[in-house]
Amino acid sequence: MNAGLHLRSRGVAQAGRTATAVQPAHPADSSDCRWLMLAAETAGLTRDSGQPAPDACLTGRGDQPRIVTCTPGTDAGSVHAARDFTLATLRRWEAAERGEDIAIVVTELLTNALRHALPGPGGTRPRQPIRLGLLQPESCVLCAVADPSKAAPAPRTPRSLAETGRGLHIVCALSDQWGCTTPSETGKVVWALFRPRPDAAVPGPVPEQAGHHRSAPVSR
């Protein structure tokens, strides 16, 4: 599989057109997004029906949440292509306010999945591919990466000069909430939620916990 993204989308037409080597969009059926909706339910954004939860990022918009999913490749260019795909989607959704944060988190989640969730050389091919999904219920954005591993993610303390081991710390720092669905035989979904930033023009003292990001407990 090359660096292209095999795209399935709903609620946005040709969302990844500006990302390099993106395959044409194909209609999505309910099974395409079931894993992503499970992540949204774990994050408290939707009910079992897929409808937005009553207090989920309210903006007064009552339509269905926007959803787009893709299957990245497994080579060196796939993460960069997925980042471009994410930024292009957010621009089309007019949700680019936190685009750079979301793109960085997508990069970290995909890198972790490619590094830890796939079998090594000579291993059995996984039953499920790695998938990337973006969902916009109301004003917030959820990004999620599904992988075939049954191991739940756990932040670890990296060594001072180590080049790896900081991925989940970055996810926690940039997102408002993150977590993982309960691992099963088909794998797991790691997700991160981004809410709109407060209006920076409002005067007043900076709250004591400004910039603090809540880390959701990881389901095991």
Image: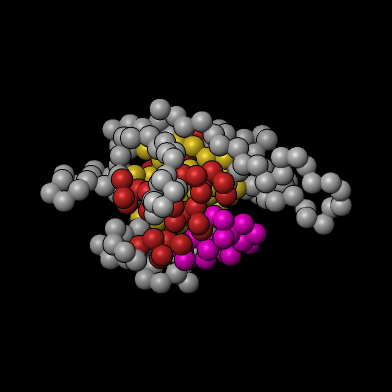
The reply, left or right, for residue 40 in relation to residue 98 is left
Which region is colored magenta? 84-102
The reply, left or right, for residue 144 in relation to residue 200 is left
The reply, left or right, for residue 130 in relation to residue 218 is left
Quadrant hosting residue 21? bottom left
Which x, y percent locates residue 5?
A: 36, 62
Is most of the magenta stretch helix, strand or loop? helix
Which x, y percent locates residue 197?
A: 70, 51
Tell which residue pokes out farthest to the top in this image: 220
Query: Would you say residue 139 is visible in this rendering?
Result: yes
Compared with 182, 74 (above or below) is below
Query: Would you say residue 93 is visible in this rendering?
Result: no
In this view, the residue in front, 181 or 89, is 181
Q: Quadrant of the N terminus?
A: bottom left
In this view, the residue in front, 161 or 141, is 161
Q: Residue at x 31, y 64 (%)?
A: 76
Q: Residue at x 31, y 45 (%)?
A: 116
Which x, y percent locates residue 52?
A: 60, 39
In this view, the residue in front, 24 or 156, is 156
Compared with 132, 35 (above or below) is above
Which x, y percent locates residue 95?
A: 62, 58
Q: How is the image coloured?
A: secondary structure
Q: Residue at x 35, y 62 (%)?
A: 78
Quadrant hosting residue 2? bottom left
Residue 133 part of the magenta segment: no
Q: Quadrant of the C terminus?
A: top left
Tell which residue pokes out farthest to the right in this image: 203
Q: Residue at x 39, y 51 (%)?
A: 162
